[in-house]
Image (tube, rainbow, N blue to C red):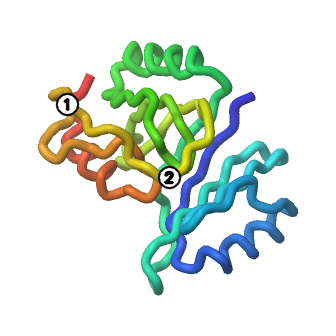
């Protein structure tokens, strides 16, 4: 099963959880400090809420497509590269309290998109291991966008040379 992911930074996590629980008629699938996600069956959506700064407006952190297998992530990576898009791959990274494999691209408005698979639960929001390859250096991106949108924004500024 695949579903679209929408990750939002929210100032009031508890208020947002209450609102989205009522909006979609479901309780969060996962709750951790500063974090909640909803696995919504209809429409198929993974809604991720990441606690932001008090008083800040809700804003987009990133978008994604959750897939069921690492093979689907690999297939998406090949398809995206074949289409000429700059990609950034991460394997066995801890992100959003989950162990994941993923590939990142950016839309024409510089919005970050990930295609990812959740392999297991993890104990931390996580940023994964430091990157050592030369792709997208400058300010090497963290291995996770979840709550670390600043790192993804840095990659966005330098990603035109990535392959």
Q: Residues within 10 Å of mark 2 (few under 14, many from 20)?
A: some
Numbered mark located on residue 132 in the image: 1
| Residue that protrudes farthest toward the front in the picture | 123
Quadrant for the N terminus in the image: top right
Q: CA distance from mark 2 to mark 1?
A: 22 Å
For label 1, the SS is: loop
Q: Which mark is residue 53?
A: none
What residue is drawn where x is 47% and y is 16%?
A: 79
Residue 36 percent across, percent down from the top left: 64, 61
Q: Residue furthest left?
A: 138
Residue at position x 38%, y 41% in the image:
128
**Relative vertical location of residue 41 with respect to residue 15 in this rendering, above or below:** above
* 2 vs 1, front mark: 2
Question: Considering the numbered disc 2 on the image, is that residue within a helix, a strand or a loop?
Answer: loop
Choose top left, top right, bottom left or bottom right for residue 117: top right
Q: Which circle's residue, 2 or 1, is located before the other in the chain?
A: 2
Q: Is residue 152 left or right of residue 139?
A: right
| Badge 1 density bin: few <14, some 14–19, many ≥20, Cα 10 Å | few
Residue named by callout 2: 124
Residue 55 position in % (x across, y down): 47, 86
Q: Position of residue 57 (x, y in %)?
A: 49, 78
Indicate the quadrant containing the C terminus: top left, top right, bottom left or bottom right. top left
For the point 38% across and 56% down, the residue is: 148
Instruction: Compare residues 126 and 7 and report the one nearer the observer.
Output: 126
Judge left or right: residue 101 versus residue 104. Answer: right
Q: Residue at x 49, y 29 (%)?
A: 101
Nearer to us in this view, 14 or 104: 14
Q: Position of residue 12 (x, y in %)?
A: 58, 79
Query: Which of 85/50 is in front?
Result: 50
């Amino acid at each position: 099963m695949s579903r679209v992911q929408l990750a939002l930074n929210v100032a009031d996590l508890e208020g947002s959880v209450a609102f989205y629980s009522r909006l979609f008629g479901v309780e969060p699938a996962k709750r951790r400090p500063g974090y909640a996600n909803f696995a919504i069956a209809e429409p198929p959506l993974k809604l991720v809420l990441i606690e932001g700064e008090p008083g800040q407006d809700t804003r987009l952190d990133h978008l994604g497509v959750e897939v069921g297998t690492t093979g689907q992530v690999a297939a998406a990576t090949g398809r995206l590269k074949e289409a000429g898009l700059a990609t950034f791959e991460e394997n066995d990274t801890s992100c959003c309290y989950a162990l994941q494999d993923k590939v990142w691209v950016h839309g024409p408005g510089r919005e970050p998109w990930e295609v990812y698979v959740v392999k297991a639960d993890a104990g931390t929001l996580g940023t994964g291991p430091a990157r050592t390859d030369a792709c997208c250096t400058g300010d090497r991106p963290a291995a996770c966008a979840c709550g670390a949108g600043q790192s993804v924004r840095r990659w966005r500024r330098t990603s035109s040379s990535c392959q």
